[in-house]
């Protein structure tokens, strides 16, 4: 039995014929399994959604109460059978609630990783390696240039600047789901215990993280504060806010951006980042390689990102690999 009988790409996304469902579909479908709540994977309008409790809750926060017809929460490590296909969810380490989805049918085991990272992160469940026959992987940072440094060292650079320029506000661009909360926790782990101020777009998801037991320390909204009260403060905002009218209220700020893309100097200049912090919620080149080998999979499918480079690396090692060239996925923080 070829794996394509169990799972193959269609215009809507990855489709499982025996179970008659899609994984992370890009268009509304009757039944959707969703790996995590970033908008390139989690869309509104599906008839029924199966995902982790956290992913469903965050989808509701971001998409509204009527984001789907019905929903079902899937705990990590448990399984259910639909259409003869055994389905289970396992932590992907990407953001809170992010999952790898395992499908088992007629002796074939496929793992769809969604987006994942291997680095320690107390704001997300740790990645859980799943042996399989076919591993479906991302390749967002699938080039040798992408080798992520220690995230705490990157956060330490921000705090060193704060100590050097205590009179200046430090504006940090960080994506609202996953990156902002991880950035806050990194700063706490580096010893910063002062209140951190948030742009309004970051507040609801951050509050949800706290409600799920993620300890982030004192956090306050930046809205309504006078400019004179912002000296020496760290303010987190969406990266796009660094270039819009909102940021003009801060006199002479130091601008920073937390993103894996900050490895590329042109991206840092484009964002206007004085402090480009290479902090990513995706696996880097080495981690992609290690994960592929550790799964023991003989066949590798690459969904999105730097597909060709990773496929070539796999083929050099005797693995059957191919790009799926799915359109519509990408790294939200690059948008």
Image (tube, helix red, strand yellow):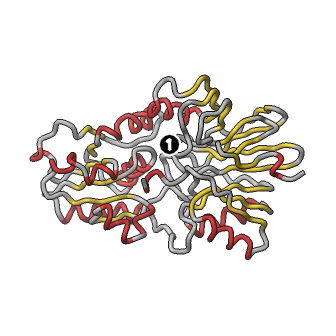
Please tell me in which quadrant of the rendered image residue 324 appears: bottom right
Left of 246 or right of it: where is 140?
right
Which residue bears the numbered disc 1? 39
Q: Residue at x 51, y 74 (%)?
A: 145
Residue 72 shows in the view: no
**Number of numbered discs present?**
1
**Image height check: is 170 above or below 22?**
below
Please tell me in which quadrant of the rendered image residue 42 appears: top right
Q: Residue at x 69, y 55 (%)?
A: 136
Question: Which one is nearer the viewer's eye here, 218 or 330?
Answer: 330
Residue 237 shows in the view: yes
Please tell me in which quadrant of the rendered image residue 139 appears: bottom right
For mark 1, give the secondary structure.
loop
Question: Which one is nearer the viewer's eye here, 301 or 172?
Answer: 301
Task: Determine the residue located farthest toward the bottom in the rendered image.
Answer: 316
Q: Residue at x 41, y 59 (%)?
A: 259
Q: Position of residue 332 (x, y in %)?
A: 46, 51
Q: Position of residue 294 (x, y in %)?
A: 72, 63
Task: Determine the residue located farthest toward the front in the rendered image.
Answer: 11
Disc 1 packing (10 Å; few <14; some 14–19; many ≥20): some
Left of 29 or right of it: where is 58?
left
Q: Residue at x 59, y 38 (%)?
A: 27
Q: Position of residue 206 (x, y in %)?
A: 39, 39
Left of 24 or right of it: where is 159?
left
Q: Position of residue 89 (x, y in %)?
A: 68, 41
Left of 104 or right of it: where is 286?
left
């Amino acid at each position: 039995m070829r794996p394509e009988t169990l799972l193959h790409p269609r215009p809507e996304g990855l489709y499982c014929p025996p179970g008659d469902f899609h994984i992370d579909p890009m268009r509304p479908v009757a039944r959707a399994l969703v790996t995590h709540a970033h908008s390139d994977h989690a869309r509104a309008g599906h008839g029924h959604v199966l995902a982790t409790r956290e992913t469903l809750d965050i989808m509701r926060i971001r998409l509204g109460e009527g984001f789907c017809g019905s929903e079902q929460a899937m705990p990590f490590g448990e399984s259910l059978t639909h259409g003869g296909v055994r389905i289970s969810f396992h932590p992907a380490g990407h953001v809170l609630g992010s999952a790898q989805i395992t499908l088992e049918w007629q002796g074939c085991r496929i793992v769809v990783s969604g987006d994942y990272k291997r680095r320690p992160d107390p704001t997300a469940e740790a990645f859980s390696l799943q042996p399989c026959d076919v591993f479906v992987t991302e390749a967002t940072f699938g080039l040798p240039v992408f080798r992520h440094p220690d995230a705490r060292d990157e956060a330490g650079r921000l705090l060193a600047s704060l100590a050097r320029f205590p009179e200046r506000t430090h504006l940090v661009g960080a994506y609202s789901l996953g990156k902002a909360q991880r950035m806050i926790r990194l700063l706490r782990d580096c010893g910063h215990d002062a209140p951190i101020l948030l742009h309004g777009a970051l507040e609801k998801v951050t509050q949800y993280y706290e409600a799920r037991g993620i300890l982030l320390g004192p956090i306050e909204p930046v809205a309504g504060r006078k400019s004179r009260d912002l000296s020496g403060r760290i303010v987190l905002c969406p990266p796009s806010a660094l270039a819009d009218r909102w940021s003009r209220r801060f006199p002479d700020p130091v601008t920073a951006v937390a993103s894996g893309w900050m490895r590329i100097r042109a991206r840092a200049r484009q964002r206007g980042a004085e402090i480009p912090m290479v902090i990513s919620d995706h696996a880097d080149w080495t981690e992609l390689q290690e994960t592929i080998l550790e799964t023991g999979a003989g066949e590798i499918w690459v969904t999105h990102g730097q597909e060709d480079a990773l496929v070539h690396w796999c083929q050099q090692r005797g693995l059957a690999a191919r790009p799926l060239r799915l359109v519509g996925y990408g790294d939200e923080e690059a948008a």
